[in-house]
Amino acid sequence: MPPQTHDIPVLAAEFTAAHPDLDPSQQRLALATYRLLAEGRPFRPQELARRGNLPTEEVASFFDEWPMVQRDCQGRVVAFGGLTLEPTSHALEVDGRTLHTWCALDTLFLPDLLGRPARIRSTSPETGETISLTVDGAGVHDVAPEGAAMTLHEVGGFDLQDVVGTFCCYVHFFASEQAARAWAERSEGTYVASIAEGFEYGRLYNHVQLGAALEEDGA
């Protein structure tokens, strides 16, 4: 079967449109949240406010309103927008720390937001094989096995209150395109993409959703 081609800009735009628009201040807050969480420990909103010299009320309001945040029993942030301190099948190694993500797509867009290269290890839900790769702001490198592929999912039914159950649970890496197709055929709305396409999908999402903050960071 010939490989299916995808209009990645259109698909990424649909995914981005399913998220709330963030103003420049909220974008800066989101980027700072990712980077503080990437230090590998839970934190309270007050710590982020101190770090960023921001009003505590503004930071607390952001976390209360943003749907893709998880806290522990002490009210500390333990997951945000795909990056989590809880173990999953998608491990993200950054600066010697092992973090985790909710899905394969997260591992492709987070290194750009963190401003750091990451080594990824992910387990295929179809065969149990390990897929590894390195991701930085420029792209994907050192993919093993060489023929690895991934799945993405349509945004119909996407629910930010349950992003793991309505999107992330369908988005995985696989050791081969054949394995990815076998799994996708059993999951309605799921389709196979190359890992390079997944990286481009994530890059486009980043630069619409958090573009202002990324531009300031790179200035």
Image (spheres, rainbow, N blue to C red):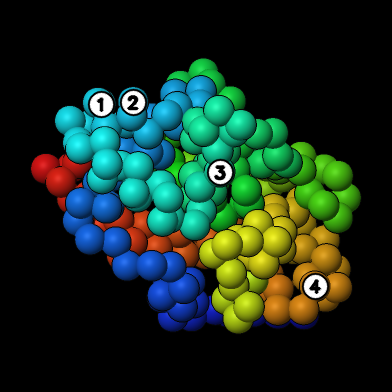
Side of 217 relative to 161 (left or right): left
Real-space CA distance between mark 3 and mark 4, rounded to the nearest whole angstrom: 26 Å
Rendered view: 122 above or below 211: above
Whether tag 3 and tag 1 are in contact, CB under 8 A, the answer is: no
Real-space CA distance between mark 4 and mark 2, rounded to the nearest whole angstrom: 41 Å
- The numbered disc on residue 70 is 3
Side of 193 relative to 179 (left or right): left
Residue 25 percent coordinates (x, y): 20, 51
Residue 133 percent coordinates (x, y): 59, 40
Side of 214 relative to 162 (left or right): left
Residue neighbourhood size for the residue with mark 1, other residues' Cα within 10 Å, grouped as few (<14), some (14–19), many (≥20) = few
Name the secondary structure under disc 4: loop
Whether tag 1 and tag 4 are in contact, CB under 8 A, the answer is: no
Q: Which residue is drawn at 57% across and 62% down?
A: 161
Residue 142 percent coordinates (x, y): 57, 39
Which one is in front, 176 or 170? 170
* Mark earlier in primary sequence (2, 3): 2
Name the secondary structure under disc 2: helix
Q: Name the residue under label 2.
A: 47
